[in-house]
Amino acid sequence: MRLLLSIILLCLAVPAFAANDRLVTIETRPGVSVPFYYMKREGAKATVLLLTGGSGGIAVKNGIPTSNNFLVRSRDLFAANGFNVVVVGKPSDHDELDGVFRTSPEHAEDLRRVIGFAKSDAGAPVWVVGTSMGTISAAALATVAGKDEVSGIVLTSSVTRKKVGALPQQKLELIKQPVLVVHHQSDECKICVPGDVPQVMQQLKNAPIKKEVYVTGGTSPTGDPCQALHRHGFIGLEKEVVDLISDWVKNPKP
């Protein structure tokens, strides 16, 4: 009976967390607003700001992100690992977040405003995690944001060629926060090439701590090699990659 009661109480407690998760929209520039899905967790020591790839959308339906993007579909794993989670959507003045906008002062300002909200509300340091085109945003932000704003960045399935803002094009030497780079060894996306990662690492010459990790395996990939359900999106490796990221954010090591 006690075991049954414990199970019932546990089941009742799980939705309580979800009930506190909500879509928030704030003004970031005059006349411009940015929506983000906010998952605040009691006792969290850090907040992870998740930046998606592609057009930058999170496919909100009924107030909940429904995108298949690796970071969007893995948000609960980050929360379960003890983080506040912020899943950032597109600003109201852009339908498509291309490389030009992702490296612009306006985009950096949008993200800094969202970070300001998270820091003010949760009082925890913020780590920025980008995937695919989101790595352009994360790296560009880190080149202009101080360590008091962004404690470190994580770049997953990084864009390394053919796009404006591809990491080797950016002034990565300006990044002075810890950086973790995670790539699937068999990523077949032609703009996110595993063999280009060493060049990115070399350019991160002023990052106080930096580490590159290549993962393998996962379930059978499907669809476009540059989309979320392929190796590019760590299909079947979500928990392993999120755990890897979480452990490093909690204790960054070269």
Image (cartoon, rainbow, N blue to C red):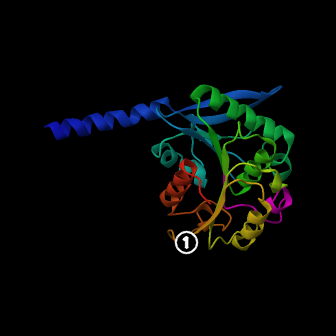
Whether residue 162 is in magenta: the answer is: yes
Q: Which residues are magenta?
A: 154-170
| Up/down of 198 relative to 245, above or below | below
> In the rendered picture of this protein, how many numbered marks are placed on residues?
1
Give the prevailing secondary structure in the magenta stretch: loop
The quadrant of the picture occupied by the C terminus is bottom right
Residue 220 or 14: which is nearer the viewer? 14
Can see residue 154? yes
Residue at 67%, 62% in the rendered image: 157
| Up/down of 34 relative to 222, above or below | above
Whether residue 109 is in magenta: the answer is: no
Residue 117: x and y in percent read 66, 28
Crowd band around label 1 with a 10 angstrom C-alpha radius: few (<14), some (14–19), many (20+): few
Residue 141: x and y in percent read 77, 45
Amino acid type shown at disc 1: Thr
Residue 14: x and y in percent read 38, 37
**Quadrant position of residue 47:** top right
Residue at 76%, 40% in the rendered image: 146
Residue at 74%, 38% in the rendered image: 111
Residue 134 or 25: which is nearer the viewer? 134
| Up/down of 159 relative to 113, above or below | below
Residue at 50%, 63% in the rendered image: 236
| Up/down of 72 relative to 13, above or below | below
Q: Which type of secondary structure does the marked residue at label 1 adopt?
A: loop
The answer to whether 106 appears left or right of 217 in the picture is right
The quadrant of the picture occupied by the N terminus is top left
Residue 85 or 11: which is nearer the viewer? 85
**Quadrant position of residue 184:** bottom right
Can see residue 62? no
Residue that label 1 marks: 216
